[in-house]
Image: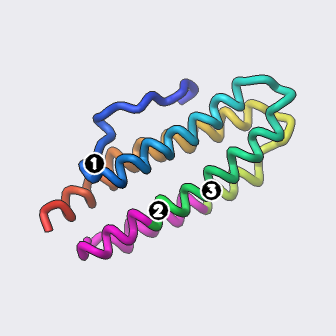
Amino acid sequence: MTEKVVWNDDYLIGIVEIDNQHKKLLLIANELYEIATGAPEAYKLKMSSALKKLTDYTVYHFSSEEEYMHKFGYAGADAHKAAHDKFVKEVSYHIQQLSADNIEDGIRFYSFVASWVLNHIAKADKIWAAAVKEA
């Protein structure tokens, strides 16, 4: 994925709070794209700021989802949390590998984040959302 993601209502899971968080998460991911394809002289400073925003918001969003799942007794909550934890570890690894001077690393990182988020919403998040809405 080397193009900026455009929100599509197919990504909605039907829980307004979480849907809004997903939209914000994709906006933050798109900042990575804008930085990586923008002015090279601003890359290092802007990427550092965007990475902080991404990590902070990811922690907030994952906590919100996990609280929601536990509140409604979703049986797959632990497995879903494990997927979140794995993503956080992968993001940390990729951040460490990012070169301050290699913009292509930023594009690859954006592609990883956007692909993961969209796949996670389309599969795992839709499953737990359907289960808790039935509860």
Q: In this view, does 26 lie to the left or right of 48?
A: left
Residue that appears at 55% across and 62% down: 59
Q: Is mark 2 on a helix, strand or loop?
A: helix
- Whether pointer 3 and pointer 2 mark residues with C-beta atoms closer than 8 Å, the reply is no
Q: Residues within 10 Å of mark 3 (few under 14, many from 20)?
A: some
Residue displayed at 31% across by 69% down: 69
Residue 74 as seen in the image, left or right of residue 2: left
Q: Mark 2 points at which residue?
A: 62
CA gap between label 3 and label 2 equals 11 Å
Q: Is residue 69 above or below residue 17?
A: below
Quarter where residue 3 is shown: top right
Check if residue 66 falls in the magenta segment.
yes
Task: From the image, tell me which residue sits under label 1.
Answer: 13
N-terminal-most mark, 3 or 2: 3
> Would residue 91 be found to the left or right of residue 117 on screen?
right
Locate residue 92: give its quadrant: bottom right
**Residue contact at pointers 1 and 3, CB within 8 angstroms:** no
Please provide the residue range marked out in magenta.
64-88
Query: Mark 1 to mark 3: distance in Å?
Result: 22 Å
Q: Which of marks 2 and 1 is nearer the N terminus?
A: 1
Callout 3: SS: helix
- The amino acid on which the numbered mark 2 sits, given as a three-letter code, is Phe
Q: Looking at the picture, which amino acid does disc 3 mark?
A: Thr
Q: Name the residue under label 3.
A: 55
Total numbered circles: 3
129 part of magenta stretch: no
Q: Which residue is drawn at 33% across and 39% down?
A: 11
Distance from the alpha carbon under mark 2 to that under mark 1:
15 Å
For marks 1 and 3 on the same chain, the one whose residue lies earlier in the sequence: 1
Q: Answer few, some or many: residues within 10 Å of disc 2's Cα (few below 14, many 20 plus, some between 14 and 19).
A: some
Q: What element carries label 1?
A: loop
